[in-house]
Image (cartoon, grey):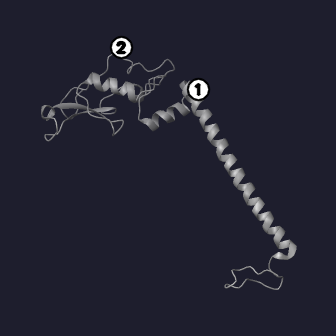
Amino acid sequence: MSNRSGHQSVKTEHGSSASQASSTDPKELPCYILSPGNHYTLGTYPNNHKTKELRGRKNYVCELSSRCSPLNSLKEIEKHIQDHHMEKHCGFIGHRDARREHVDTSECHKDSERRKKRDDNLAYLTKKKEQARFKDGEERRMRYEEEDRLRMSGNGRTSGASGGSAASGGRRRV
């Protein structure tokens, strides 16, 4: 099989950890097998590259993140993807958000340390938000009760006034 540039598509060796999916049946998804065009592409350094020796040379470009630098060999790109874009627990390959979603939803991460830490962190954040909402609600409730107390004690608007004067700021004291 050849791609548009005329080069053969390269399959990874069976011994590499990138081609070994997991023992939990990955269902032969492409996100468990390192594949050219999907995870990396073959390209060339531009003719105006700062390093003269690299100008026009072929390189491998990681397609999983725009922040990755081009690498010079297939072994380097395989190692890069294994180190930076692959879940160690099951062999899932993808960009950061895809890996995060995979860890959240996949059965193979059900009892993993990473999911436990994430669940604990989400529980902590939820608790903090709830505490902040409760505190804000309590402050509002106290403010409304104070305003009600002032109104009921006769320090509010007089019963005949339907609205306050704009010059007096809206509230008149009796």
Spot occupied by residue 20 in the image (x, y as percentages of width and height) = 41, 18
Point out the tag, 2 or 1, that comes first from the N-terminus. 2
In 3D space, how far apart are the residues under numbered discs 2 and 1 (Cα atoms)?
26 Å
Spot occupied by residue 146 in the image (x, y as percentages of width and height) = 80, 65
The residue at the point 75 percent across, 55 percent down is: 138
10 Å crowding of disc 1: few (<14), some (14-19), many (20+):
few
Location of residue 167 with respect to 46 vertically, above or below = below
Q: Relative to residue 108, is residue 158 drawn left or right? A: right
**Residue 113 can be seen, yes or no:** yes
Could you tell me which secondary element the residue under label 1 belongs to?
Answer: loop
Which numbered circle lies on residue 15?
Answer: 2
Disc 1 marks a residue whose amino acid type is Lys
Disc 2 marks a residue whose amino acid type is Gly
- Judging by the rendered image, the residue that carries numbered circle 1 is 110
Which numbered circle lies on residue 164?
Answer: none
Could you tell me which secondary element the residue under label 2 belongs to?
Answer: loop
